[in-house]
Amino acid sequence: MASAGVLSRYRVFLDLPAHTQVVTLLEGDTPLIPVPRLGAELGGCDLYVKFEGLNPTGSFKDRGMTAAISEAYGRGAKAVICASTGNTAASAAAYAARCGLRAIVLIPEGKVATGKLAGAVAYGAEVIQIQGSFDDALSLVVAISEKHPIALVNSLNPYRLEGQKSAAFEICDSLGRAPAWLCLPVGNAGNITAYWMGFRQYHQHLGTGLPRLLGVQATGAAPLVLGYPVEHPETVATAIRIGRPARGEQALQAAEESNGRILAVEDEAILSMQHRLAQEGIWVEPASAAGLAGLESALHAREIEVRGQQVVAVCTGHGLKDPDSITRRMPAPRLLPAELAPLEEAIIQP
Ligand code: F0G
């Protein structure tokens, strides 16, 4: 297997067993895109988008998956399993395919965006829909992986977090230090946990400083804000439609240690921020806009002050993952005969 990608780039910082055999799609090294216009609107901050939708399968999950699959493959596992709202499924399927492992993915019935389901199927995973939520699916994969020799590759798997730390390293490498704030969506809470581990570790070794973390949930799926599990989570941001986050405690601790916070935003605010990001040329799936929607909400409530400070928003998944979130809100494009006159009439202002 090739030896580039986040594992080889950051190997000294990643706690992986000796038997790990690198399985990579050259994930990571995603752009940190300055968005000055939006930054001016959002409290006058120096704003950057870490566009994780540009990973090989279209989401940040590839960073953790290269680690989890490399470990499983290296120890001779023959099959991997995960529960997923879609992105983890597609990523697990791709990396498993890459090294010939069987991939089984459990998804909540009818709630997975088209691009994610299509990805999992395209990469050859065995896809099973569960008559229940993501949380139900996660309980099932944990139980079956304890009973049978099938490697669990959800973020309960510690190697997933090791790989996902690499995004924090990249941000510090690009900016020369940690930003003042890092905003990101929170679902099962693995990513915010991994970012905090990564920032702390880099700071210990290189003195890069620590950001304050702003973790954002959708109001219909906000167990960490409410303080109790949500039995029937609902949100347009299906990626974070999670009621019992596996790493919820660690997420709360990370927010607290960083002097940050976890808050919730309405679906309308998420969709509106998705639209504003697209106006900057960055099309993300709904969940990925939650971080910035949360920043706006906190600024509005005068809970934080970011003027002149560096803020990084993690945009976790590409817009192509969930095209329906756009098309179902739009009228179909207008249809004209293939003639000049009606075209002129349609687009040229008098
Ligand atoms: N953004 C996107 C696009 C996601 O797919 C997810 C999680 C998150 C944010 C939240 O990350 O769970 O680490 O807090 N998706 C998982 C999945 C649950 O199955 O693909 P988290």
Image (tube, rainbow, N blue to C red):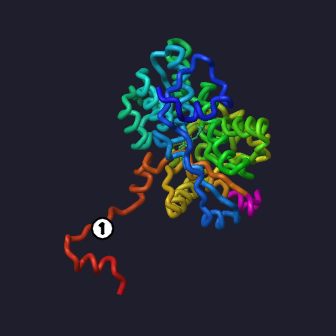
The main secondary structure of the magenta stretch is: loop
Where residue 210 sits in the image (x, y, percent)?
Answer: 77, 45
173 over 205 or under it: above or below: below
Where residue 281 sits in the image (x, y, percent)?
Answer: 49, 60
Question: What residue is shown with label 1?
Answer: 334
Q: Which residue is at 65% across, 58% downward?
A: 47
Horizontal side of 248 relative to 334 (left or right) equals right
As shown in the figure, which amino acid type bears the numbered disc 1?
Arg
CB of mark 1 near ligand 1 (< 8 Å): no
Question: Does the image show residue 176?
Answer: yes
Q: Which residue is at 31% across, 77% downward?
A: 346
Crowd class of label 1 (few under 14; some 14 to 19; many from 20; radius 10 Å): few
Q: Which residue is at 59% across, 52% downward?
A: 32
Residue closest to the eye, 32 or 316: 32
Q: Quadrant of the C terminus?
A: bottom left
Residue closest to the eye, 61 or 205: 205
Magenta stretch in the rendered image: 297-309
Task: In the displayed orientation, state which residue is furthest to the bottom.
Answer: 350
Q: Quarter containing ligand 1?
A: top right
Where residue 176 sits in the image (x, y, percent)?
Answer: 71, 49
Task: In the displayed orientation, state which residue is furthest to the front.
Answer: 3
Where residue 44 sits in the image (x, y, percent)?
Answer: 70, 65
